[in-house]
Image: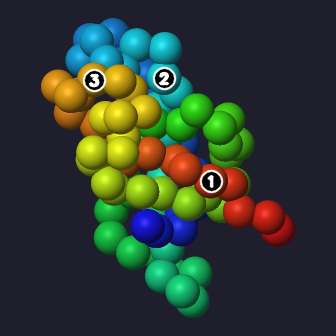
Amino acid sequence: MLTGIMVGTATSTAKHDSLNGWKLALVQAQMQDGSPDGEPVLAIDNLGAAMGSRVVLTSEGGAVRDMLKRNDSPVRWMVMGLCDS
């Protein structure tokens, strides 16, 4: 699990059909001191995170595929929580 800041959203005219209906969030992972940790990642978001929100991410592909109810989904990252301020 990682914490990060939602820095944007993505839209796509062509995508895997398991992603239909899901909000795609661009999240910048952060180190403990608040500095960026690598490149931003694309995650599905069913919690409605807003721009600038601190979120908890998981990269557990199996859990994400279980949420989507699809074993063939290419999704790796999912917003699994919103951090309190």
- Residue 55 at what x, y percent from top left? 61, 58
- Residue 58 at what x, y percent from top left? 42, 57
Q: First in sequence, mark 2 or 1: give its number.
A: 2
- Helix, strand or loop at label 2? It is loop
Q: Residue at x 53, y 68 (%)?
A: 3
For disc 2, the marked residue is 22
Q: Residues within 10 Å of mark 2 (few under 14, many from 20)?
A: few
Number of the front mark, 2 or 1: 1
For disc 3, the marked residue is 70
**In this picture, residue 77 sits left or right of residue 22:** left
Q: Callout 2, which amino acid? A: Trp
Number of the front mark, 3 or 1: 3
Name the residue at the bottom extreme.
33
Name the residue at the left extreme.
72
- Residue 77 at what x, y percent from top left? 36, 48
60 above or below 46? below
Q: Callout 3, which amino acid? A: Arg
- Helix, strand or loop at label 1? It is strand
- Residue 54 at what x, y percent from top left? 66, 61
C-alpha span from label 3 to label 1: 21 Å
24 above or below 12? below
Res 29 → quadrant:
bottom left
Residue 16 visible somewhere in the drawing: yes
Q: Residue at x 31, y 35 (%)?
A: 65
Number of the front mark, 3 or 2: 3
**In this picture, residue 81 sits left or right of residue 62:** right
Q: Quadrant of the C terminus?
A: bottom right
For disc 1, the marked residue is 81
Q: Callout 1, which amino acid? A: Gly
